[in-house]
């Protein structure tokens, strides 16, 4: 090869990098200014590297058998950046693929095509007021909720993280809270800058002023003295689960609604976003976002029941250990949970199978469930052994779930992988509450065994944010339709 000639493989790679670099500021602008999150076949491009933008485009070839190059998708992003949009999740890959390969263009220019496909969010009247969010508790879920809320900073952000409430207040507490937000052994470093304002008892993260409030009870805070009003309090402590306990939050001045990040007790609505969020009414003051496992399995069960029918089944959860367990053997009020979490597989119970019927009443009495806690710190799996009402085969069932994951109203809830090499750590940070492992699917006549991965921390937190948005009256459509 002539020394002046460049390797075509390297040349192609550099071209892709250059387009990805040009995409990054547009992706940021669309999110900060309009609340528009860009995806490529379900994979979010929010705050990702240029390499991840390139990798996301490979999903189009994997699912459609056709390449959409970055130079081909870039004009669609440029066209979007010139429009005044309202909050939405827009799949750039589907937009470009539809124009290039599905004969949807109808002789329109890229700009006119984008305007037609996104008509529902162009120049629409925005009458949703920004909502104050308070995190009551700052453990594993609390800190991941904070990360997801902070990344939404921008002029059109409707969900403003204003405060966290914790017990304590000793010297050094504020810095320790900030440090736990800054560094995470599982999810890595915080994407941005975090500083501490000791004088005002605040954590400053990427331009967000987060008031740290110390309190001994949910009914003992006057939020209005911090400029917080009409707030949604997201209780992630797990201490209060019924109306009497969670209702204490409503006695604090400045609180309007309460969202629980655990299964509730009593008559409180358990919401799995995407499945029964239409049950949320303006008058609901307290709502539960159910559990991570319920969020992982319910969307998959819903679509399977609609298409194949489910007679009955059993769900076994292979769940990472949690803070509720002991590092080494010690007393625990529950059976077996006192034994060392990093050293043992621990059989325990789960209410997730029964809880499914709260979001999906047609599954009432059809499922049993159990759980095994295993020595991994994050990412779990649900194994669903189901008896269907009609016979099928592995290819038909997998193809149906793939189509649902890519093109249904549950694109944000059901992920799908055909990788033969995927393991639990590959799912860390997945925004889907559940990801179907199609290579593990087993089907024999009307019996099916499905394996669904889920990041029981991050994927669940994404669902919690969506429920909070619904409680605030914010509807974020998926486009193109």
Image (cartoon, helix red, strand yellow):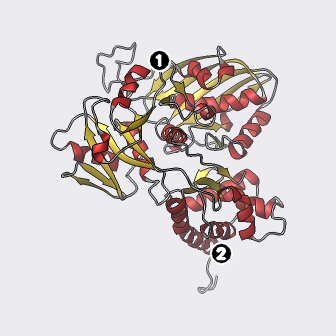
Q: Nearer the viewer, mark 1 or mark 2?
A: 1
Residue 169 percent location from the top left of the image: 19, 38
Q: Which residue is mark 2?
A: 8
Where residue 373 is drawn, which disc sits there?
A: none
Residue 368 percent location from the top left of the image: 60, 15
- Above or below, 296 relative to 143: above
Q: Earlier in the sequence, mark 1 or mark 2?
A: 2
Q: Is residue 10 left or right of residue 164?
A: right
Mark 1 lies on a secondary structure that is strand
| Identity of the residue drawn at 70% across and 46% down | 406
Q: Residue reaching furthest left?
A: 171
Contact between marks 1 and 2 (CB within 8 A): the answer is: no
Mark 2 lies on a secondary structure that is helix
Looking at the rendering, which quadrant does residue 304 occupy? Answer: top right
Q: Is residue 29 visible?
A: yes
- Above or below, 158 relative to 116: above
Q: Is residue 91 left or right of residue 207?
A: right
Residue 446 percent location from the top left of the image: 78, 22
Residue 120 percent location from the top left of the image: 68, 55
- Above or below, 197 relative to 27: above
- Above or below, 70 relative to 463: below
The alpha-carbon separation of the residues under discs 1 and 2 comes to 55 Å
Where residue 347 is drawn, which disc sits there?
A: 1
Q: Please identify the quadrant where the N terminus is shown.
A: bottom right
């Amino acid at each position: 090869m002539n020394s002046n000639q460049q390797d075509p493989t390297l040349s192609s790679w550099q071209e892709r990098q250059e387009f990805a670099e040009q995409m990054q500021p547009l992706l940021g602008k669309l999110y900060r200014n309009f609340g528009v999150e860009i995806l490529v076949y379900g994979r979010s491009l929010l705050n990702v590297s240029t390499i991840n933008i390139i990798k996301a485009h490979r999903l189009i070839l994997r699912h459609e058998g056709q390449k959409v190059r970055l130079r081909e998708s870039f004009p669609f992003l440029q066209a979007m950046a010139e429009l005044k949009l309202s909050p939405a999740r827009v799949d750039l890959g589907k937009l470009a693929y539809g124009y290039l390969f599905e004969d949807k263009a109808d002789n329109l220019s890229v700009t006119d095509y984008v305007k037609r496909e996104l008509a529902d969010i162009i120049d629409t009247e925005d009458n949703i007021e920004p909502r104050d969010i308070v995190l009551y508790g700052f453990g594993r879920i609390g800190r991941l909720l904070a990360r997801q809320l902070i990344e939404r900073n921008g002029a059109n952000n409707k969900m403003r993280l204003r405060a966290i409430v914790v017990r304590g207040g000793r010297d050094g507490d504020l810095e320790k809270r900030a440090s736990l937000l800054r560094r995470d052994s599982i999810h890595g470093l915080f994407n941005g800058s975090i500083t501490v304002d000791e004088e005002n008892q605040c954590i400053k993260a990427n331009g967000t002023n987060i008031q740290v409030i110390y309190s001994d009870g949910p009914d003992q805070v006057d939020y209005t003295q911090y400029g917080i009003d009409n707030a949604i309090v997201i209780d992630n402590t797990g201490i209060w689960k019924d109306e009497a306990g969670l209702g204490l939050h409503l006695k604090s001045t400045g609180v309007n609604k309460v969202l629980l990040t655990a299964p509730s007790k009593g008559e409180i609505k358990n919401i799995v976003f995407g499945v029964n969020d239409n049950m949320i009414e303006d008058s609901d003051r307290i709502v539960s976002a159910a559990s991570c496992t319920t969020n992982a399995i319910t969307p998959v069960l819903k679509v399977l029941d609609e298409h194949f029918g489910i007679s009955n089944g059993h769900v076994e959860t292979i769940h990472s250990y949690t803070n509720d367990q002991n590092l080494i053997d010690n007393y625990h009020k529950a059976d077996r949970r006192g034994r060392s979490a990093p050293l043992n597989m621990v059989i325990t119970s789960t209410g997730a199978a029964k809880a499914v019927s709260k979001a999906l009443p047609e599954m009432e009495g059809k499922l049993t469930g159990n759980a095994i806690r295993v020595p991994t710190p994050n990412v779990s799996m649900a194994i669903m052994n189901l008896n269907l009402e009609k016979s099928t085969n592995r290819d038909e069932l997998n193809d149906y779930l793939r189509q649902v994951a890519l093109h249904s109203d549950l694109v944000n809830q059901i992920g799908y992988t055909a990788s033969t090499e995927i393991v639990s750590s590959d799912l860390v940070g997945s925004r889907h509450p559940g990801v179907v492992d199609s290579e593990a699917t087993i089907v024999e006549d009307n019996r099916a065994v499905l394996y669904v991965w889920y990041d029981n921390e991050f994927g669940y937190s994404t669902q919690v944010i969506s429920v909070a948005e619904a409680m605030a009256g914010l509807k974020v459509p998926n486009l193109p339709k």
